[in-house]
Image (spheres, grey):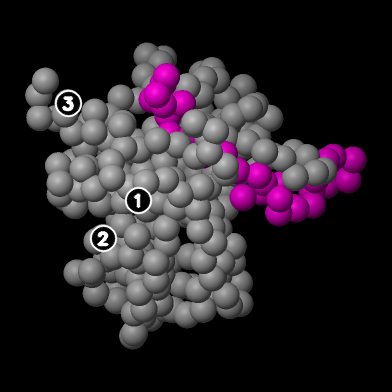
Amino acid sequence: MSGAALILAAWLGACGNDRDRGQPQGSARPDSGSRTVERLVSDTTVVRGPGVPTDPDDTLGTRYEKHEAPRAVQAPECVPHGIAQCVTDTATTVRSVECCMNDQRETRWLVFAAAGDSMQLFLYPDGSYLDMEPPSAGRFMAEHSHGADATWIRPRFGHSGTYVFTVGIESDDPVEYDLRVVPVIARGASRPTGRSATLTINGKPSSKVVIAPASMAASLDSSALRAFAVSAGSYRVLLVRDTAYYGCRLPCSTRRRLSIRPGTAVTFTP
């Protein structure tokens, strides 16, 4: 087996998901596999994985910040039977919509990426949508097919930073779903582990607060940290292997370290 194949195999073995082996949602797991991966992969090493193939006729491009797909893209199976890291979550936040329609339940996810990374994200089951901010390198914030917002998004990341992915599901009640994540290209420091946590950032909604893995942000100045800034509020966090993060309110004259571990709920006041 080649060195690259060994690295990928180690990632698949160490990066499970929040729903396999009967684990409760967001639960922490022993991290011996993660330590093995840390010995194999440096922070800047590029790790490539299999993704869901793009259809040959997927050439419609982007309109109104949505990538037009010729047909629905099916969500892959969860590891170990498939290629997706699956995180089970419940969308609870209510977003009221127009008259005569059900309200929507939403969850906002923080996703960390390095420039040039690519990832595929899917929602399961159907009947939901997924968008991102800021836009992908392809200048789209969502995907679209046959007049409907898509339950998947396949972005390439144009710059390093913290991205916000919003899950929306039409429902009057809290609803459970799977976020299925397929890392296609990532660095050792930015590759998702398939684990999650909850983060509440105290402050006004207009406040911009940097949340960045320490390994990705240690050498960055205040200007570069702006790409890792998000609004104050509540988020689910798609974790990387780092447990140490930097947090600060822009312009980040002083950084603080915080710990975010799998299955934890963290409150940060910048």
The tag earlier along the polypeptide, 2 or 3, is 3
Residue in the image at 82% along x and 43% along y: 172
Q: Amino acid at mark 1?
A: Val
Q: Which residue is mark 1?
A: 240
Element marked by disc 2: helix
The tag earlier along the polypeptide, 2 or 1, is 2
Q: Is residue 64 visible?
A: no
The residues colored magenta run 78-107
2 and 1 marks in contact (CB < 8 Å): yes
Q: Toward which corner of the image does residue 211 lie, by quadrant?
A: bottom left
Q: Which residue is mark 3?
A: 5
Q: Amino acid at mark 2?
A: Met
Q: CA distance from mark 2 to mark 3?
A: 24 Å
Q: Residues within 10 Å of mark 1 (few under 14, many from 20)?
A: many
Q: Amino acid at mark 3?
A: Ala
* Rendered location of residue 63, percent (x, y): 51, 36
Residue in the image at 30% along x and 32% along y: 13
Element marked by disc 3: helix
- Of discs 2 and 1, which sits in the foreground? 1
Q: Which residue is mark 2?
A: 216
